[in-house]
Image (tube, rainbow, N blue to C red):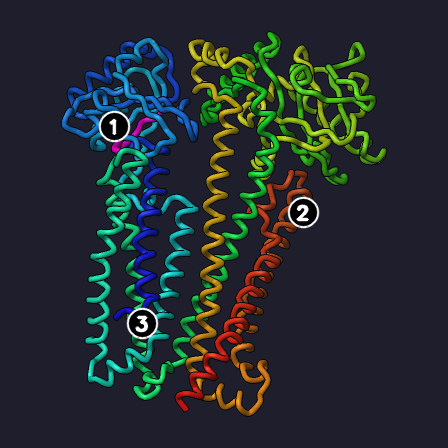
Amino acid sequence: MLPRGVKFAHAAVFLFAALLAFLSLRALDEGVTIGASYGILVEDFGGGAASSARVIEEVESLADELGVNVAYEDRDLLQGPGSRRRLYLAIGDPDDPSGSWLKRGYPEFSRSLTTEVHPMRELRGLDPRGTYLVFGPQDSARELLATFERLGYRGTLFSQPSLLDPNAYFGQKGELESLLIMIVAVVMTVGASVVLNAKTYGVLRLQGRSFAQILGRDMALIAAFWVRAAALVAALVAAALLAYNGLSRPAYFGLFFAVFLAALALPALVAHALALAITYRTRITDAIKGETSGTLAMLGTCSVRVVASLLTLAVAISTFTAAREVAAQQASREAFAKIGDASVPVLTSDPADREVEKRYDRKIGAWIHDAESRGEVIIATRADVESMTPPGKPTPKRDVLIVNDEYLAEQTVLDTSGERLAGLREPGVKAQILLPESLSESEKDRLASSVTGWLKSEADLYKAELNDREIETLSTKPGQRVFTYGSFLPTGGTDELADAMLSDPVIVVVPKDSDILDGGYPTYATQGGVIFKDPRYIKRAMSTGVGEFLIGAEPVARRAATDYWTTVREFRITLFNTTAALAVLLISAASAALIYRRKNAQSLFVKYINGWPFAKAHLSLLILEAALALALLGWVSWQTISRLLTERELAAQYRAEGIPPPPTEAVPLAQWQPAVMLAVVVAGFLTTILVLALSQSTMIRRQAIEG
């Protein structure tokens, strides 16, 4: 008979492979259109570009000529849970699985995304730019790209994730962490079960069985167990998928399941063979008593302990980070819900050609300025106070938000008397600096000086006039949380994105009739700081001269909802991973105690009857545990301190050159890694002590009976 732990491990392998297959296939289905081989992103066009009707006609004709299917994917609607995706399909190969989608619909695996399929001719008259998917070879995709270029458009060819791409299976960070944790758990469970079953293997050796015969016996028993487990899991999975999505894409699910089953089962079988080799090195007489060759067993257990500890550290930090982001985003969801369809423009990336870049800045800047003067635009862009501070001067630590008067009309900002601020109060004033009343006078002076200097330099840069008398400084009521509309810092720091509410920031008000910041509008737009109250204004602009740099409109609230649900999903996965990793850690600690007890059963019994205290009797294991804990804690502390010192030196170099330093916290909550590792090693150490204490009485009774 197989040890119970081995049976349990292989049952877990089947169930977890099914779970990972479900999660990965669902993520793939929500992220891409499954079945497409290549894609072409058509972003802009030059002079004399063909009309939309002609473009669609050419695409349909080429699809028919090449015998491939081509689909236009409406990416604006591909925005997270509960959303919709539209495919506009030209059929040139009706025998391809995608050829039936117009009649039967897209075979969705995920229930979180609804995909509508329409004939491509319905795109005629609409903007033809966007993503085109090719269900065929690369040569066909290149032909389609050449067709777009001939029609006056520019595009980029890219590959779609295929079932031969490892990223399709292991590209999701949370699922990959789950897989690694499960591999460690399976290896630990199988290895410990085989080692602790030394008595059974000792009897088989006494009967004359060789190592190969014993291993073959176990593999045959595992194969028989697999047949039963496969039938049961197949029935359970089929029933679950039938209820979830009508048993959609069973072949894809089977392939994903087979890949994850192999990834989990192979380490389990290797661990079984290695653990059996360890027990085979034990003398037969010792093995029959249940004792094992302790050196190799303890070495393997300690190796697993190290891996389990590092995995637990990594996923625990991820969980803390995700929990912080969920809490922060939850606090700002009400503000996002109130802004309705307010959208940010999705722009093409900055052109590499200098002349095109100048045209890009001029057209986008003028378009935003015109829309702002019409009351269509809210400016709410984050600024880096370090970039406002002259080199060599102390850098104030405070969030800065640049807004226009439309922002103040939409969002509530109170002065010290509790009255709502509505814009500039004095005639002739062109800008306003709002400072929290809670700041000290020296801090206010430093911040006002930094912001004033920055405003004047921006005005000079864009050939506008601004002097000190035209800048008004006021105080705001302390304790206010101000909405950013989800804009982010130009340095790209990610921590700020988790919370769209700033506590007592410095607010710089530049009214819509001012030309101080006109040249910076294209940059602000790429930071999510230019918000159009009506997205139709953006869509109408796509048919004008500025349309060559516009991809579309992205609703701010929908983007925030997508980020929120993505973060919630990551938090749930990391929380599960942390629980699983902690379980693996505790199992490995318990296994170390049990293997140590089996290895030293006789000597521990002698020590007990001679009255040795617990700590002295188990001194060797306690020293090993302490050394392991100190090594892990020391290594993590050294890594953390080295990283912080390096970041500090780099920041000092940037400041010395008058450049704002980049974001320093590349790994969120990384400074807490030593504290988390301390908790991890303490948990493992206490588990070892507890298992030793609980098993000591059992060992003593057994030795008394056998003795």
Mark 1: secondary structure: strand
* N-terminal label among 3 and 1: 1
Magenta range: 35-42
Q: Are marks 3 and 1 in contact (CB under 8 Å)?
A: no
Q: Relative to 659, say whether 430 is above or below.
A: above
- Quarter of the image with the N terminus is bottom left
User: How many angstroms separate mark 2 from mark 1 (CA)?
Assistant: 50 Å
Of the pair 465 and 566, the residue shown nearer to us:
566
Q: Closer to the observer: label 3 or label 2?
A: 3
Whether residue 266 is visible:
yes
Q: Closer to the observer: label 3 or label 1?
A: 3
Across and down, in percent, residue 703 comes to: 43, 86
Residue at the location (47% across, 42% down)? 570
Across and down, in percent, residue 372 comes to: 60, 12
Residue at the location (57% across, 81% down)? 614
Amino acid on which the number 3 mark rests in the picture: Leu
| Residue 551, quarter of picture | top left
Is residue 320 located in the magenta-colored stretch of the structure?
Answer: no
Position of 601 with respect to 26 (left or right) is right
Disc 3 marks which residue?
Answer: 274
Of the pair 151 and 628, the residue shown nearer to us:
628
